[in-house]
Image (tube, helix red, strand yellow):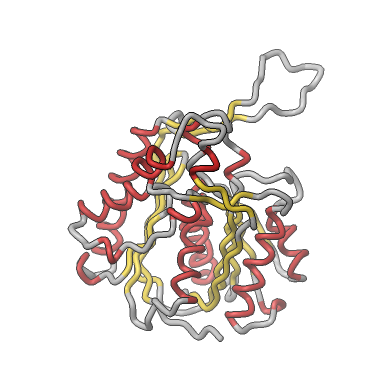
């Protein structure tokens, strides 16, 4: 597996902490101290599918291949306005692809799960060029009267185009049964036979439990994939963690005894964009020229479920 193209897209509307303080019992200091987040970009008049298509087109262009040479599309998404068709089908139409496509939902770990599926497809001979798109709109999952959740999220799409190569050095995805720590429930259409009460429950989160579980899982996953790759923690050039909370990233940095300079972050600008956060950060670093050939990179994420994943890749790019 080798990443040859990256892309990302954000809504136009930027919401600062001070803007949230106008209708929430909060302020910039309260949010920044607990999360590191200063602002986030939120969908207003755009549609998530348009962000996804934009990010996908960027990755394809930078990868330097024709869209009809893409063999598979994998889309990571938690929630969007379409129940059916899948968001991957919408993206497929928007970029004029002619390959199979599928959606996955592994919450904020979706990008890592997508990478594992793509890597497995390549090794099995199913597909050579695979587009992974992570498109997320978590701001539509929260109660905007609940300051403990609504201040955390932003909307975004990130994409990578991968082809065959030997840049994947190790991979691990896991799941633990903690379904009550972070969840949302949606009321479905009624039937004449339904005999139970249903209700819409916006995103519920046990913040301290999420924090502790995320830090512990990230440290464990990172240690596992680094050892499996035959490396030492000090050999890693960049640790790209899911951008959920700057304090989580700082805690992982501390426990791994690595300087924060190795942990790039943009959560202060975008908030938690779910599975889109790592490919967005990867694209930004790539566009700034911060990723050098031969760099050893750890990717690590955690999400509702509780899903987790990590991998070690060696960066080599032929992007145009």
Q: Is residue 247 or residue 6 the one in the foreground?
A: 247
Against 301, residue 230 (above or below) is below
- Residue shown at 51%/78% (left/top)? 164
Query: In the image, 261: left or right of 112?
Result: left
- Residue shown at 71%/56% (left/top)? 49
The image shows residue 119 at horizontal and vertical percentages of 49, 67
- Residue shown at 22%/62% (left/top)? 259
The image shows residue 116 at horizontal and vertical percentages of 47, 61
The image shows residue 217 at horizontal and vertical percentages of 32, 46
Answer yes or no: is residue 296 visible. Answer: yes
Residue at the farthest right position: 192
Q: Is residue 291 or residue 99 the one in the foreground?
A: 291
Q: Quadrant of residue 197?
A: top right
Answer yes or no: is residue 113 visible. Answer: no
Query: In the image, 285: left or right of 92?
Result: left
The image shows residue 150 at horizontal and vertical percentages of 53, 37
Query: In the image, 245: left or right of 107?
Result: left
Against 68, residue 51 (above or below) is above
Q: Quadrant of residue 241?
A: bottom left
Q: Quadrant of residue 64?
A: bottom right
């Amino acid at each position: 597996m080798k990443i040859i193209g990256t892309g990302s897209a954000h809504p136009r509307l930027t919401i600062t902490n001070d803007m949230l303080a106008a209708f929430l019992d909060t302020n910039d200091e309260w949010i920044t101290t607990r999360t590191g987040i200063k602002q986030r970009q939120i969908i207003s008049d755009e549609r998530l599918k348009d962000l996804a298509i934009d990010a996908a087109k960027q990755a394809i262009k930078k990868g330097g291949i024709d869209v009809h040479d893409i063999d598979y599309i994998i889309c990571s998404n938690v929630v969007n306005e379409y129940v059916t068709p899948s968001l991957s089908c919408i993206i497929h139409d928007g970029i004029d692809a002619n390959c199979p496509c599928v959606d996955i939902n592994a919450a904020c770990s979706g990008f890592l799960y997508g990478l594992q599926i793509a890597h497995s497809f390549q090794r099995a001979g199913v597909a050579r060029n695979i587009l992974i798109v992570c498109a997320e709109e978590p701001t539509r999952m929260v109660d905007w009267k609940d300051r403990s959740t609504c201040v955390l999220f932003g909307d975004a799409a990130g994409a990578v185009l991968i082809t065959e190569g030997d840049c994947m050095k190790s991979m691990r995805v896991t799941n633990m049964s903690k379904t009550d720590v972070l969840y949302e429930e949606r009321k479905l259409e009624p039937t004449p036979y339904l005999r139970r009460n249903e209700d819409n429950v916006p995103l519920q989160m046990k913040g301290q439990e999420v924090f502790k579980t995320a830090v512990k899982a990230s440290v464990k996953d990172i240690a596992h994939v680094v050892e499996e790759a035959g490396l030492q923690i000090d050999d890693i050039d960049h640790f790209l963690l899911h951008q959920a909370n700057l304090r989580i990233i700082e805690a992982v940095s501390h426990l791994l005894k690595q300087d924060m300079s190795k942990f790039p972050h943009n959560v202060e600008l975008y908030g938690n964009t779910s599975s889109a956060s790592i490919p967005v950060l990867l694209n930004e670093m790539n566009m700034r020229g911060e990723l050098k050939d031969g760099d050893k990179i750890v990717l690590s994420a955690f999400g509702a479920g509780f899903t987790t994943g990590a991998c070690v890749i060696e960066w080599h790019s032929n992007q145009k």
